[in-house]
């Protein structure tokens, strides 16, 4: 398996869980996502984008990272371009670091939708901010290793048919969920979380390392 960590422009906190997820991965930074390289103590092998949102002051060693520059008037986001580079290098697994938060809700939505599309092509994809994680859900079954009490939601990207959820405070047994329904928002794990789906597409959004309340 060839795993790549893609550094995106959203928020990120370093956690032991995230360290494990990116350990041994090859790294590509997308524009302002380069700022996460120091936080994660990783060395990107490539830095792509139009470089319109790069912080003005960067560590000197970033100058040695090979760059691939694109015009600002382009048909893809910097994040999608970085993912395309990883696919060109033969990636079979992606960890999208900094996939949530930031100043662009449209980019956050794109990351979720793109992850689903990549999963449909057979790619293993994890979206993460360190505090939150996202996994595409397609027809079939999947299990997750979260601790008891972990908050999670299932975000439908279509009508969901035959959705079952085991190991949860509010289990479900082969239910149909209309597109846009809030039925699958704000659940909690109880033991080993197992989700199965007969038809549809969705994203599991979990909070394994919640941020402190202010």
Image (cartoon, helix red, strand yellow):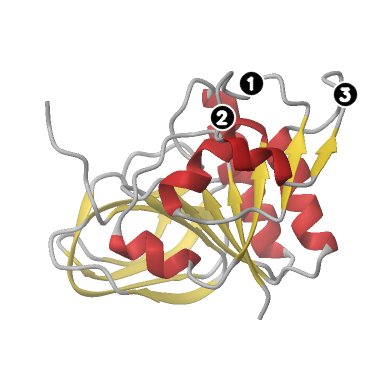
Q: Residues within 10 Å of mark 2 (few under 14, many from 20)?
A: few
Pointer 3: what residue? Answer: 71
Lower sequence index among marks 2 and 1: 1
For residue 100, side relative to residue 144 (left or right): right
Pointer 2: what residue? Answer: 58
User: Percent from the top left, x then y, of residue 94?
Assistant: 61, 62
Lower sequence index among marks 2 and 3: 2
User: Percent from the top left, x then y, of residue 200?
Assistant: 57, 58
Task: Residue 177: tell me if it is visible.
Answer: no
Instruction: Please tell me which residue lies in front, 205 or 73.
Output: 73
Tell me which corner region of the image, top left, top right, bottom left or bottom right, holds residue 54.
top right
Question: What residue do we see at 42% from left, 35% from top?
Answer: 11
Camera-nearest label, 2 or 1: 2
Instruction: Please tell me which residue lies in front, 5 or 42.
Output: 42
Q: Secondary structure at mark 1?
A: loop
Q: Residues within 10 Å of mark 1 (few under 14, many from 20)?
A: few
Above or below for 61 versus 10: below
Above or below for 53 versus 49: above
Above or below for 111 versus 76: below
Q: CA distance from mark 3 to mark 1?
A: 13 Å
Instruction: Please tell me which residue lies in front, 190 or 35.
Output: 35
Question: What residue do we see at 64% from left, 40% from top?
Answer: 62
Q: Secondary structure at mark 3?
A: loop
Q: CA distance from mark 2 to mark 1?
A: 12 Å
Tell me which corner region of the image, top left, top right, bottom left or bottom right, holds residue 12.
top left
Instruction: Please tell me which residue lies in front, 8 or 192.
Output: 8
Which residue is the extreme one toward the bottom? 1
């Amino acid at each position: 398996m060839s795993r790549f960590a893609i550094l995106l422009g959203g928020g990120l906190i370093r956690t032991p869980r995230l360290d494990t997820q990116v350990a041994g991965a090859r790294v590509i930074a997308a524009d302002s996502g380069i700022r996460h390289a120091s936080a994660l103590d990783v060395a990107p092998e490539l830095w792509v984008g139009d470089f319109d949102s790069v912080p003005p002051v960067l560590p000197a060693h970033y100058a040695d990272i090979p760059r691939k520059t694109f015009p600002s008037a382009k048909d893809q986001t910097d994040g999608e371009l970085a993912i395309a580079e990883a696919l060109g290098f033969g990636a079979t697994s992606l960890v999208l670091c900094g996939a949530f938060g930031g100043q662009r809700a449209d980019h956050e939505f794109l990351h979720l939708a793109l992850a689903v599309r990549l999963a449909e092509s057979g790619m293993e994809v994890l979206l993460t901010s360190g505090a939150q994680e996202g996994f595409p859900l397609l027809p079939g079954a999947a299990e997750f290793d979260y601790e008891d009490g972990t908050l999670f939601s299932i975000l439908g990207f279509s009508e969901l048919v035959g959705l079952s959820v085991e190991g949860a405070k509010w289990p479900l047994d082969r239910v149909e969920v209309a597109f846009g329904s809030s039925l699958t928002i704000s659940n909690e794990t109880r033991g080993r979380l197992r989700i199965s789906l007969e038809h549809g597409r969705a994203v599991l959004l979990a909070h394994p390392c919640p941020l402190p309340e202010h």
